[in-house]
Amino acid sequence: MPQPLALAFDVFGTVVDWRTSIAREADAFFAALGHEIDGAQFADQWRGLYQPAMEECRSGRRPYTRLDILNRETLEALLARHDIDPSGIEDAALDRFARAWRRLDPWPDAVEGLTRLKVRFPIVTLSNGNTALTLEMARRAGLPWDTILGAESTGHYKPLPQAYLGTADILGIAPGALCLVAAHHSDLAAARACGLMTAYVHRPQEYGGRIAPDANLAQDWDYRADSFIGLAGQLER
Amino acid sequence: MPQPLALAFDVFGTVVDWRTSIAREADAFFAALGHEIDGAQFADQWRGLYQPAMEECRSGRRPYTRLDILNRETLEALLARHDIDPSGIEDAALDRFARAWRRLDPWPDAVEGLTRLKVRFPIVTLSNGNTALTLEMARRAGLPWDTILGAESTGHYKPLPQAYLGTADILGIAPGALCLVAAHHSDLAAARACGLMTAYVHRPQEYGGRIAPDANLAQDWDYRADSFIGLAGQLER
């Protein structure tokens, strides 16, 4: 197996635990408003609106729109489903909650593993998160990216091929020299179809212990590890 | 003076000493070829072709083209002026020399100063260097950028307004909340015209002790320091 020249990381679910973090922020948000809504359930519902919102852009029905904006829109839609009128909530509070996706906690191995991987490989994001979102998250969580790339730098949301190929192009390397690290089989499958190398990292708690929705898309990925530290051990061989 | 929300750095000349580094690489390149050409003079001549090459893109006569490519083109043109036929040189050697701009040494205070500034402020590049160039330079020199932005992420070379305004837009902050840190008055003047804050860092050795070509454009900048460490001291007040 040839060594990659750079590692590109999916972020939501792979590097950070969105569900626990959003649930915590949702609990606080609804408690302050006096609503009894389960934070973890709200997190799952909000995440459920993520792919349809990006699909509007992927399909070309809407130009590329930053995830910060999509998150605010899907939050308002989801509040309405819970019979909460967003216009009755202070704009700054809504915006702060919409930006909860900037304040996600890393999985316990993430910072140590990335720091170790960075010694030998350039480590970049290949995320659907926009740059400002991913930068604020990185500073808060201590994620030592060499640079932030992904949907915003390519103008295309994953799993469109342009997101993967455009990232390799910006890095000035062949797609086959770039390895996507992700906890999602659908993401890895799309990267492999573009010629990228693939590293699967198992994150069984991403959905609170439930099976990942794309588990049926599993393939024999180039690398497979239970943590970034385990991946580092494999790549350093 | 309000505090900025982020610091954006010019790189060539402000963070790294391009002249000494290119002179060193040129000396080695020409020695290997058996040519007697002064490295420092060659560095100045190469730098002299930098603005005209970017101007082709700024003017719209040519679409945005990465600096790595412009550097290779201007290298070949400059070799021809020295009566050296580039086609007589191995392509890999030419490419390695063209990419000498990825291997520039930082000024002595740069890494310590950036590390200190990063504690309080997001630090990003706002450079005409393309992402891959700036990333390789950062890894080699230990420059701890939060992310790499600039010409490639905005599609426009400085001093076009789009380069400054686009960088603030990607960061999700108002232009007035972004502070450009640069050793060049012309760069700072263009940033100020876009509403950015400005911090001048004096780099008297950028041109080997000669006066900077844009010294006549000096203004009363928001901050003025002799090093990044000095700038950190002012911003921490």
Image (tube, coloured by chain):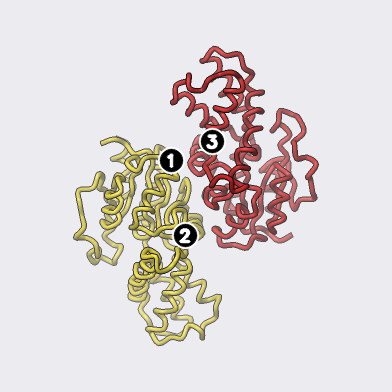
Chain colours: A yellow, B red
Q: Quadrant of the N terminus of chain B?
A: bottom right
In this rendered view, identify the residue nearer to me: B177 or A23. Answer: B177
Q: Residues within 10 Å of mark 2 (few under 14, many from 20)?
A: many
Q: Is residue A188 visible?
A: yes
* Residue linked to disc 3: B141
Q: At 36% from the left edge and 76% from the top edge, which residue is drawn?
A: A42
* Residue linked to disc 1: A172
In the image, residue A73 sits, relative to residue B236, either above or below, namely below
User: Do the CB atoms of the residues marked 2 and 3 lie less than 8 Å apart?
Assistant: no
Please state the horizontal and vertical placement of residue B235, each as a whole percent of the image.
69, 52
* Residue linked to disc 2: A130
Is B233 left, or right, of B103 in this rendering?
right
Q: At 30% from the left edge and 48% from the top edge, which residue is drawn?
A: A194
Three-letter amino acid code at disc 1?
Gly
Q: Are marks 2 and 1 on the same chain?
A: yes
Is B75 left, or right, of A228 in this rendering?
right
Please state the horizontal and vertical placement of residue B127, each as a whole percent of the image.
59, 45
In this rendered view, identify the residue nearer to me: A145 or A126. Answer: A126
Labels 1, 3: front one: 1
> Badge 1 sits on which subunit?
A
The quadrant where residue B217 appears = top right
> Badge 2 sits on which subunit?
A
